[in-house]
Amino acid sequence: MAVNSSTHLAPPPLRSLPRSSFAFFSRIFLHPVSPTGFPRRSLVSVRAQAPTPDGYGSKQPLRLGESGPLIESTGSPSSSSVIDFLTLCHRLKTTKRKGWINHGINGPESIADHMYRMALMSLIAGDLPGVNRERCIKIALVHDIAEAIVGDITPSDGVPKEEKSRRESAALNEMCQLLGGGMRAEEIKELWTEYENNSSLEANLVKDFDKVELILQAFEYEIEHGRALDEFFHSTAGKFQTDVGKSWAAEVLSRRNSRLTNRHN
């Protein structure tokens, strides 16, 4: 299972720094190895103040324009790359989920609508042993992000699973290049791959949330549009992996069955 916590290499104590010159040292924060096998890193350089006779830096606050601690971090995308990336992601807000279009639902939810409610599910789920809820939220937010380029590919499109994955992976790489690469892009790739491969407890849970959100939306459209959308309930039956997913799905099905019973009475 992927873990979010960081391992910090402690810097040497200040009293070991030389007294005769400015002290320069670097701290490297090593994050756990990602599923791709590469550690994620952030390099931070720090310049200390000139030492005083007692061996320590001045205790006086620095004024504007004076030389003080210099911190440089790597991995942050440029403003230009960020806006380019977000502009592309706008398509997630405007692209409607094709399954609903194919069933004649007017004004259906967008891809972003779907991912947002999945992120909320991850937020409100109870604490589970060994599950990092923050990571679940992140996975939910990026799991369909490649659809900004490839669109919503559904089973009715007849695209083999391997080909669908290949297209989405290529689109994801293109989006991460647009973001400028670096730590944030690598994190998005890592989260997406984790979900795609169903390779962690977090991915298992978010996969279930994907199906719960689907049948909940189907139930809501049945009420709103007065039609049966049995296909979505049949396609997800028996495919929930976690107790939470099974419980939430059972609640949706119970409410749907009660409504169907009342309509027939």
Image (cartoon, rainbow, N blue to C red):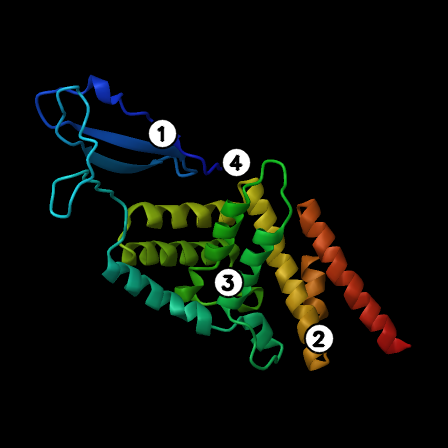
- Cα separation, mark 1 vs mark 4, equals 20 Å
Marked residue nearer the N-terminal end (1 or 4): 4
Marked residue nearer the N-terminal end (4 or 2): 4
Residue plotted at (55% across, 44% down): 202
**Residue assigned mark 1:** 8
Q: Amino acid at mark 1?
A: His
Q: Which mark is residue 126?
A: none
Are the residues tagged 3 and 4 within 8 Å (C-beta)? no
Residue 60 appears in the picture as rendered: yes
Marked residue nearer the N-terminal end (3 or 4): 4
- Circle 4 sits in a helix, a strand or a loop, which is it? loop
**Residue assigned mark 3:** 159
Q: Which mark is residue 1?
A: 4
Q: Nearest to the eye among marks 3 and 4: give it.
A: 4
- Cα separation, mark 3 vs mark 4, equals 30 Å
- In the image, 203: left or right of 217? left
In this view, 121 is above or below 91: above
**Residue assigned mark 2:** 222
